[in-house]
Image: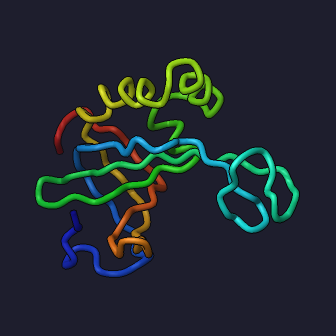
């Protein structure tokens, strides 16, 4: 799934798109990382720097505008706003009901939603595809 290159053709380009969520990726939404080296950490401390790890909320999915689709990544407050829950609430739901239950509950609303998204395009170095880091978004009531 690639976004049309004639519309978005460079890394770090700011864009605005409107489309439907067609998929949410069901990966762990709360990651821990070292604030010094920025690498992912398993547990409460970075074993390299022996410092407390920090949390990062990230939700990712696919937005389709009817002509093409692109991966969108929501971080921190944008991720909380997307699901309507704070970090602590997300952790609690996952702890009590599991990750699949968390995603099932938010997919019922999000996969029907039409969104206007503003963000920055980046090239994913792992698979060489374009993705959008969301900076601002709004769920629209109807297709405009």
Colour treatment of the image: rainbow
In which image quadrant can residue 11 be found?
Answer: bottom left
**Would residue 108 appear left or right of 65 to someone viewing this image?**
right
The N terminus lies in which quarter of the figure? bottom left
At a point 22% along the width and 77% down the height, the residue shown is 5
Q: Residue pushed farthest right?
A: 50
Q: Nearer the viewer, residue 50 or 8?
A: 50
Query: x%, y% of residue 9?
Result: 29, 80
Query: x%, y% of residue 83?
Result: 46, 32
Query: x%, y% of residue 103?
Result: 40, 31
Query: x%, y% of residue 123?
Result: 40, 74
**Would residue 100 appear left or right of 39 to someone viewing this image?**
left
Does 28 appear above or below 96? below
Q: Residue pushed farthest left?
A: 67
At a point 74% along the width and 68% down the height, the residue shown is 37
At a point 17% along the width and 45% down the height, the residue shown is 144
At a point 39% along the width and 69% down the height, the residue shown is 121
In which image quadrant can residue 34 be found?
Answer: bottom right
**Would residue 143 appear left or right of 111 to someone viewing this image?**
left
In which image quadrant can residue 128 be found?
Answer: bottom left
Q: How many marks?
A: 0
Q: Nearer the viewer, residue 121 or 97?
A: 97
């Amino acid at each position: 799934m690639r976004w049309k290159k004639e519309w978005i053709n460079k890394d770090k380009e700011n864009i605005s798109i409107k489309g439907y969520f067609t998929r949410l990726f069901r990966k762990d939404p709360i990651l821990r990382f070292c604030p010094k080296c920025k690498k992912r950490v398993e547990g409460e401390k970075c074993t390299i720097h022996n410092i407390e790890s920090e949390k990062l909320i990230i939700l990712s999915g696919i937005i389709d505008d009817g002509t093409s689709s692109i991966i969108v990544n929501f971080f921190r407050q944008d991720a909380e706003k997307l699901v309507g829950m704070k970090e602590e609430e997300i952790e609690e739901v996952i702890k009590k009901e599991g990750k699949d239950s968390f995603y099932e509950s938010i997919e019922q609303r999000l996969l029907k939603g039409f969104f206007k998204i503003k963000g920055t395009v980046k090239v994913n170095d792992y698979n060489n595809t374009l993705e959008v880091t969301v900076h601002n978004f709004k769920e629209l009531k109807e297709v405009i």
